[in-house]
Image (spheres, coloured by chain):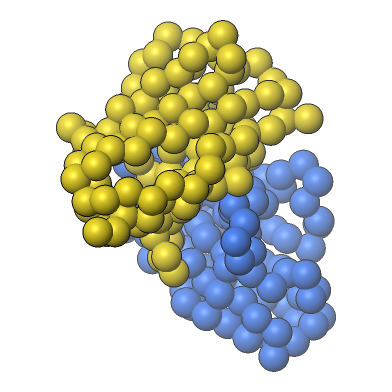
Amino acid sequence: QVQLVQSGAEVKKPGASVKLSCKTSGYTFSDSHIYWLRQAPGQGLEWMGWINPSNGGTNYAQKFRGRVTMTRDSSISTAYMELNRLKSDDTAVFYCAKVLGPMTTAFDFWGQGTLVTVSS
Amino acid sequence: DIQMTQSPSSLSASVGDKVTISCQASQDIGNFLNWYQQKPGKAPKLLIFDASNLETGVPSRFSGSGSGTDFTFTISSLQPEDIATYFCQYYDDLPPIAFGQGTRLDIK
């Protein structure tokens, strides 16, 4: 069965960086872009960007360009998201997700979420 | 950027009721619209993709309709396990992907 398993919760100070992982299984890693999204406490969902596992190509939301880097290790079917220069309003649950198919950006499987808390 | 306006922001209904949630796009988005259910502390779950297609394994009491700028999500007969927050999500070939603000549904 398809699974996306994310790394554990993080507590960071403002200005620090965080790198999250998303280990996938149950499907061919290169078949689906991996998206990263986040959800601040009590808020809606926000798209951060995606990585194409087949070639490492990325596309970042304008808001995060210059501060986010998405990478992958195809040998272990794992995607990573690093966010730099953290601020208090980066406190959120971060999710990775795969898409249903090449012709639709519907997220059919999600990681369990990683809470990142940014606090001095 | 395309803006998604979801309404209502909260809703109370009784078991067995028909529930309807709306999502309006600021410009024509064709059928590039998905619906999700999110329960507290959990990741969202895909229910409807491309406006009206029921995701595999999702009960048939859930449905979606619409195209262009106006979309509707319906639960034909509300069940206790349907208590959750529901989001619409727009997508296109290019960024951005945008989500509605969410509708919190609870039992009256």
Q: Is residue A11 left or right of residue A78?
A: left
Front residue (pair A84, B1): A84
- Where is B67 relative to B101, above or below? above
Q: Quadrant of the N terminus of chain A?
A: top right
* Label total for image: 0
At which x and y percent is residue A111?
59, 41
Front residue (pair B40, B25): B40
At which x and y percent is residue A76?
58, 14
Query: Which residue: 76% across, 82% down?
Result: B17
Which residue is most to the bottom? B108
- Where is B62 relative to B106, above or below? above
Q: Colour of chain A?
A: yellow
Q: Quadrant of residue A75?
A: top right
At which x and y percent is residue A20?
44, 35
Front residue (pair A13, B50): A13
Query: Which residue: 61% across, 76% down?
Result: B105
- Where is A16 relative to A116, above or below? above
Q: Is residue A95 left or right of residue B35?
A: left
Q: Quadrant of the C terminus of chain A?
A: bottom left
Q: Which chain is blue?
A: B
Front residue (pair B95, A118): A118
| Residue A63 appears in the rendering | no
| Residue A74 appears in the rendering | yes
